[in-house]
Amino acid sequence: MAKRISLSLFGLLFMLGQAAEAAPIQEYELKTAYLYNFALFTSWPADLPPELGDTMAICTLGQDQFGPTLEQLQGRKIREKRLVVRRGVNLEEALSCHVVYIAASEQENMDKVYETLRNSSVLTVSESSKASPIKSVINMAIDKKRLVFEVNLAAATQARLVMSSKLLHLAKRVY
Amino acid sequence: MSCSGYLRPVAATTGFFLLFAASMACADDLHTVELLDEPLQNLLMMEVSSASTYAQKMHDAPSSAIVVTSDDIRTFGYRTLAEVLASMRGLYITNDRSWSYVGVRGFSRSGDYNSRVLLMVDGMRVNDNVFNQAYIGSEFIVDIDLVDRVEFIPGPGASIYGDNAFFGVINVITKKAGAMLGKSVSGEVGSYQSYKGSARYAALFENGGELVMSATALDSQGRDWRYKELGGVARDLDGENYQKLFAKFSLQGLTLEAAHIDRDKQNPTAAFGTVFNDSRYLATDKHTFISATYESQISETLGMRLHVNHGVFEYQTKYPLPTALNLDQAYGSRNTVDARFTSTAFDQHKIVGGVEYIRDSRLDQVNFDVAPRKLNLKDDQANDKYGLYLQDEVRLREDWLLNAGVRYDHYSTFGGTVNPRLALIYQPAPDNNIKLIHGRAFRAPNAYELYYSNNILGAQQKGNTALRPETITTYELAWDKAWNQNWQSHLGVFHYHIDDLISQQLDPADGTLVFRNVDHARTRGLELGLEGSLSSVSRLRSSLTYQDARDAATDQWLINSPRWLGKVAMSTKLYGAWQVGTELLYSSKRRTIAAETGSALLVNATLNHREWLPGLDVSIGVYNLFDQRYSDPADAINVQDTIRQDGRTLRIKLDYRF
């Protein structure tokens, strides 16, 4: 109950306004920024399939809750590659993405998702606060009102992704 | 359409602004862009607010708002704001081949100005100040490609916004620079030789400044229409062209915004007894606004928003009458200043208070015949009005919220009016909200109704400065519930009373037509909505509305009031990255002045592909796919009882980002 009150207070606070700095950051705004940083601090193998071309595709699988925030990435550049946002892709399309955010709506098919994406060079990002080890390359979770992330190095290696030491340093957990 | 009786179709004029933006269910400011440039280590330190704050805001709002996003606009290929509104639960659009009118709760009297909704751009009033009309068709001041989202907040909004927030408030929120960085251009080709082009530029500066600029032009030949009542085909008389400009710059709480439209629309219907097939029948609207808004958080619990706005609204229609070419003109100029404060200083209370002052420095109306030259009307007016408002949102208990607001408006014409709104919101769970809402709103008589007098066309009419505002009293119950992560439903019941409607009447004393507060109406109904995901790549949004709108004195079914509206919009991924959006819009029959229109089922389908080639998006839309023949009820100024609407049309659109 205390939590719910604090949540609604946050809601009120936010309504307070645009009021810029004072307002708390929205979860999915922050997650958008995290996705951007994950892409920034990851290196993909040089021999990517040609359809990946000179753009970098940030995709979401399933029904994501980013609202309009994710589109803010559209058109930005990372290492001379223009970011392209594709939302609600299917598994097959996910194979031609650089980053795939797996929405909570896909929770039930997680096994199939990882089975399909495991050997491709896709940076899979999940969000789960469960304690169990993650199958995705990166998992985000909210911990004491902060957004934290953990990195599964084994999955990264299998996907032939190189995670920068800065990212590993900032991760809450690496395994 | 225009006024009820004689001459002067709508027009346009000034406009400008009112209060702040956001309000209720509105506008959330994304600061994603700033976050992107923040080092990751800083992001890790940031406190995050609950996931569904956006939804939460909607939940707490004293209304059940409907939102259409830029994604929907792309997916369903909406070409105008009117098409966006037509997709929304309970709304329907009427077109008289000059302007578009939105019907809400089964109310959209033929011949009335579109002035019973408040139209805002980024929280600024854009209804003009002579006719107080909301311009929603292609006559809307902002290019649809600049729209981030459209919010419709049904129900009376006068307790915050004052005039025109009668049946609801439309708030159009424009894109932020971060959503469209760099240079981009769009080109489109449509049926009947319609061509539209636009160029946009958006930038973020190192000091945090944001800039958006856009220019748009359209030219459309229009189609030929057969009018059996007029005994022929109106050839090349439905043409249209417009130019729109928009610019927005913001830096540290200060936002400067300006927009301009210059639109010409021919009219093939030979309304007002004009000569049939005379291509000179042309309506022109030129609207401009420029505004400055400053927002600041004075302390942890006190927010402030100051706003100034200047709007200019020019209107002209050329009427080729049998005797002479008649010009009907209006010029309006409006200055607005308002201040709004938001306080959370008291535990469990969120208090919003504000004051707004509007000076209609020019309300000019002119009517003259060109040759032989004859002045029929020249009327220059200026009015003042101010409003004071206060709203308190009280969390009574964890699961009960009370939202109580009231606004006092004072007009130099009719005096004062007080409009309250009370909403009791029960939230047994964050995704389960039941709202009981009672409110009152008003529509002030516009300058046309107050002052317009002339005797052209053998029909004399005169203004009435004794007019009082129209009022509406509403009761509604809304239940919004999310059943699981994917599916949400809406159930609504409403009962509205409308009093002192302004209609034109024959004054027996001198045989002229005069506006009076004579009519009363009531409307009640039921709404259902269901939306959700059919699969990870398919979404469905549907609604069904039943509404029964009647004249309170005679119990007669109102003109232009469909009893049933049904909408289904479905989007799905097809092969590759192709996406298809299909929309079904159903309206049951409507009463007309003499008879009835048939029912209509329109199907629109749009196929789109983002990044079809690097930087290039493509969209192909077919509207009224099955070429359904349908008509809108006409006004008394038409010979026709109904005005036929567009058959199948096609549009191909390309967007390119450099």
Image: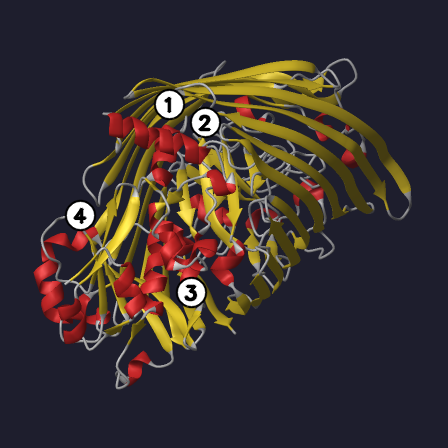
Mark 3, secondary structure of its residue: loop
Q: Which numbered dot is residue B155?
A: 2
Quarter of the rendering containing residue B613:
bottom left
Query: Considering only vertical position in the picture, is B526 above or below B231?
Result: above
Picture residue at 38% right of the left edge, 75% below the top: B612
Q: How many marks?
A: 4
Mark 3, chain letter?
A: A
Q: Is residue B519 above or below residue B324?
A: above
User: Which of these two is toward me, B172 or B557?
Assistant: B172
* Label drawn at residue A74: 3
The residue to which callout 1 is attached is B494
Q: CA distance from mark 3 to mark 1?
A: 42 Å
- The amino acid sitting under disc 3 is Gln
Q: Chain of mark 2?
A: B
Mark 1 vs mark 4: give the one in front.
4
Amino acid bearing label 4: Ser
